[in-house]
Image (cartoon, rainbow, N blue to C red):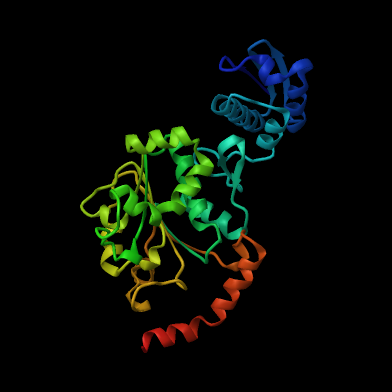
């Protein structure tokens, strides 16, 4: 048996343990294999090393939650305790990714979303393929925000090809931001779930979070960054090569796309399809395929996707022979 003294100076003991130790009792029930003795800002933990480490990690998460949201209810503690902490080296993987706005837990909800999370820890470049609503982009952005919070990277870069305008945005009204925002709104939507509005605005102003069309990636080297290319099925082979070769030191890239929704003149022009064929056997590059079972939108979306997939071959033939 091991004894360890933990100091919790960052939070008022009454806030952490509750009136009459009501919160402490909840924590104790979650860790029956350790003995907890509390005196003011000190906690003596008695048990086996592994169980002490598990408790210490969870306690840090509880305190971090309070530090971020300035609140800690019994329900908050229960939610945190019910989500297995992913260790800094990512050996232990679970559906929990991070807490979003208002303390809402953001999780990988399906088997393939969980696989996406697991593969992102193993690979510096990851392709996530799947239909609309399968959570590929949302999960990828959650992983990026988590990496930023954990100071694993210094910035997040999010990009999409503005294919509907051929990436020639000059004819659209307004300044640059007004021209490109319609193409990037889905990325803003995900970020707004995870980062408070004022903080997100500050991150964007400071360049800690950058959101831009793919054309703006040319000539850059992205170090210490978590980079996501969304809607990659609409990139050309040259655009995809340009994007992938932006990878710098301590960078992680996730490329998401739906190969059934290619808006280019020819399906064969898609840089996403070509890059997967060329890169699939390289160590450090992962590929995760999501499908209609991963769709977490309205139940009709699954049926819509199935119907379109059933006609995919016919549609592809007709487009290629116009």
In the displayed orientation, state which residue is furthest to the top. Answer: 40
Q: Nearer the viewer, residue 142 or 320?
A: 320
The residue shown at (40%, 84%) is 319
In the displayed orientation, state which residue is furthest to the bottom. Answer: 321
Residue 47 sits in which quadrant? top right
Can residue 308 be seen here? yes
Q: Is residue 221 left or right of residue 81?
A: left
Residue 87 sits in which quadrant? top right
**Residue 284, position in %: x, y?**
39, 56
Residue 33 sits in which quadrant? top right
**14 shown above or below 247:** above
**Residue 98, position in %: x, y?**
56, 40
Q: Nearer the viewer, residue 55 or 232?
A: 232
**Residue 147, position in %: x, y?**
45, 40
The residue shown at (48%, 36%) is 197
Quadrant containing the C terminus in the rendered view: bottom left
**87 shown above or below 304:** above
The residue shown at (45%, 71%) is 261
Can residue 150 be seen here? no
User: In this figure, what is the number of numbered marks?
Assistant: 0
The residue shown at (38%, 63%) is 232
């Amino acid at each position: 048996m091991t004894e360890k003294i933990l100091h919790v100076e960052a939070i008022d003991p009454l806030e952490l343990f509750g009136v009459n130790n009501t919160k402490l009792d909840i924590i104790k029930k979650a860790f029956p294999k350790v003995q907890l003795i509390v005196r003011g800002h000190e906690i003596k933990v008695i048990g086996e090393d592994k169980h002490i480490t598990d408790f210490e990690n969870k306690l840090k998460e509880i305190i971090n939650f309070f530090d971020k949201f300035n609140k800690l209810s019994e329900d908050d503690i229960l939610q945190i305790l019910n989500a297995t902490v992913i260790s800094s080296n990512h050996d232990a993987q679970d559906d929990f990714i991070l807490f979003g706005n208002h303390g809402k837990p953001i999780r990988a909800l399906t088997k393939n979303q969980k696989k996406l999370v697991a593969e992102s820890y193993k690979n510096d470049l990851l392709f996530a393929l799947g239909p609309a609503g399968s959570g590929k982009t949302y999960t990828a952005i959650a992983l990026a925000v988590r990496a930023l919070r954990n100071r694993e990277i210094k910035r997040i870069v999010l990009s999409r090809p503005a294919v509907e305008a051929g990436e020639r945005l000059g004819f659209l009204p307004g300044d640059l931001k007004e021209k490109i925002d319609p193409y990037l709104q889905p990325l803003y939507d995900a970020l707004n779930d995870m980062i408070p509005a004022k903080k997100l605005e500050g991150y964007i102003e400071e360049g800690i979070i950058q959101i831009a069309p793919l054309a703006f990636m040319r000539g850059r080297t992205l170090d210490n960054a978590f980079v996501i290319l969304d809607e990659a099925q609409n990139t050309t082979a040259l655009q995809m090569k340009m994007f992938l070769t932006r990878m710098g030191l301590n960078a992680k890239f996730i490329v998401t796309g739906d190969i059934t929704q290619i808006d280019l003149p020819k399906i064969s022009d898609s840089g996403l399809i070509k890059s997967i064929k060329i890169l699939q056997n390289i160590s450090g590059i992962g590929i995760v395929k999501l499908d209609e079972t991963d769709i977490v939108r309205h139940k009709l979306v699954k049926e819509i996707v199935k119907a379109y997939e059933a006609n995919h071959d016919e549609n592809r033939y007709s487009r290629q022979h116009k």
